[in-house]
């Protein structure tokens, strides 16, 4: 008998954006997560699968805000009302780190057709068409290893499906999500005995074919610059006596664009702006988040390329973030959080016709500001 289910993960409800202090942008980015969840549920209701798996980090934190809770109950409630079983495991983000805190997952216990695994233990349940095995997030590596060693596929003719929230023990530069635990390398052979292994924690869709039918569904929405090239969505799986047929179904997400201009000390403002314009000419910047990295600036031309000129090239974007780096510095001088006097320097720079005069002025100003800061620090009680 054919079995069809949906696998999605890492919804991170309540997450906004850690790279900006603009509360309007944060609000929009938080709402993007709710939109992605609704669109996923819309697809599920159209597809009418036998059941749905969510492999952790449904919420961004273990004590989410009201908006995250309301959206969660509304959307999972839609699945429950439709009679579509929903199975979820806790992730490292939404499972508490102390035993005195109640797991937020209990809010779903009143919904029919909903089962959440959040007890830091391996368990399995018999469903009509398969055996479902689950290991939710476990806070300690020692206990994770103990629970992994308990994994045993059911020996009957029904498919065995395993769901976990963790990293696989490989070198993975593309994934920066930490803290979810790592599957013990010595136990990898067991994964090949499952008809499908549904993983959460890494935010990019990926078939870990070296371990068998092992899949990360990825996240429904982009979280940060590290996911700029990730296509976001969920996975539809069919099992009909053979190996699984896995289809990644993409969702439309907000564009995150990155433009890097190197060797800026050899270029004037017109040249730098031209490179930015060329890089963006075929991209949809409306409503997008745009990162501009200006590398290798000299102290002379640090303020030459002004934010207002770049804003003219990126009209309509949700958020513009400019990072400036002086040549020879390993870290950004100001990132996208300029010092209070940076805009003033941009205006003053235009008043100087001699570079040496400007450098001398900048040096004296920096010294004066440092003296003021030192005096303020000494006067703090």
Image (tube, grey):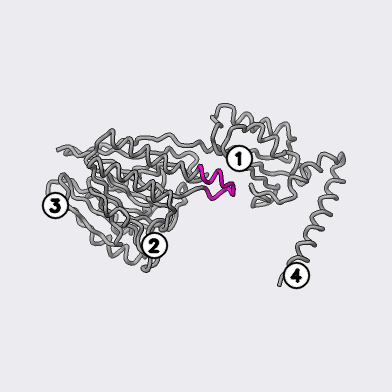
In front: label 4 or label 3: 4
Mark 4 to mark 3: distance in Å? 73 Å
In front: label 2 or label 3: 2
Question: Does 140 sit left or right of 325 as displayed?
Answer: left
- Sequence-wise first label, 4 or 2: 2
The answer to whether residue 106 is above or below residue 30 is: below
Q: Label 4's element? A: helix
Q: Which residue is mark 1?
A: 320
Q: Which residues are magenta?
A: 17-28
In front: label 1 or label 3: 1
Question: Does 146 sit left or right of 232 as displayed?
Answer: left
Say few, some or many: other residues with alpha carbon within 10 Å of mark 4 (under 14 / 14 to 19 / 20 or more).
Answer: few
Q: Which residue is mark 4?
A: 378
Label 2 close to label 3 by CB (< 8 Å):
no
Q: Which residue is mark 3?
A: 155
- Sequence-wise first label, 2 or 1: 2
Q: Residue 234: which quarter of the image?
A: top left
Q: How many marks?
A: 4
């Amino acid at each position: 008998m054919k079995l069809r289910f949906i696998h999605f993960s890492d919804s991170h409800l309540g997450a906004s954006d850690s790279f900006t202090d603009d509360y309007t942008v944060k609000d929009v980015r938080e709402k993007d997560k709710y939109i992605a969840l609704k669109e996923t549920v819309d697809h599920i209701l159209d597809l009418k699968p036998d059941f749905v798996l969510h492999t952790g980090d449904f919420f961004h934190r273990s004590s989410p805000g009201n908006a995250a809770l309301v959206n969660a109950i509304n959307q999972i409630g839609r699945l429950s009302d439709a009679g579509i079983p929903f199975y979820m495991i806790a992730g490292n983000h939404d499972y508490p780190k102390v035993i005195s805190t109640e797991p937020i997952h209990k809010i779903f216990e009143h919904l029919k057709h909903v089962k959440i695994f959040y007890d830091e233990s391996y368990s399995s349940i018999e469903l009509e068409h398969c055996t479902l095995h689950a290991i939710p997030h476990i806070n300690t590596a020692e206990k994770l290893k103990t629970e992994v060693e308990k994994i045993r596929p059911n020996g009957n003719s029904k498919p065995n499906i395993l769901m976990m929230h963790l990293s696989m023990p490989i070198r993975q530069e593309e994934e920066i999500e930490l803290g979810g635990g790592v599957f013990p390398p010595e136990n990898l052979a067991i994964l090949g005995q499952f008809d499908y292994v549904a993983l959460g924690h890494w935010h990019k869709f990926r078939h870990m074919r070296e371990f068998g039918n092992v899949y990360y569904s990825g996240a429904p929405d982009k979280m940060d610059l590290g996911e700029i090239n990730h296509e976001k969505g969920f996975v539809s799986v069919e099992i009909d006596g053979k190996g699984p047929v896995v289809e990644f179904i993409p969702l439309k997400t907000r564009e995150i664009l990155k433009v890097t201009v190197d060797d800026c000390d050899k270029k004037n403002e017109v040249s730098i702006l031209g490179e930015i314009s060329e890089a963006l000419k075929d991209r949809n910047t409306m409503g997008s988040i745009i990162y501009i990295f200006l590398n290798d600036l000299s102290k002379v031309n640090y303020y030459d390329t002004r934010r207002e000129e770049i804003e003219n090239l990126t009209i309509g974007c949700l958020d513009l973030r400019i990072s400036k780096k002086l040549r020879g510095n390993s870290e950004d001088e100001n990132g996208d959080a300029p010092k209070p006097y940076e805009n003033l320097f941009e205006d003053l720079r235009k008043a100087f016709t001699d570079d040496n005069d400007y450098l001398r002025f900048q040096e004296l100003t920096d010294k004066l500001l440092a003296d003021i800061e030192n005096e303020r620090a000494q006067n703090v009680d």
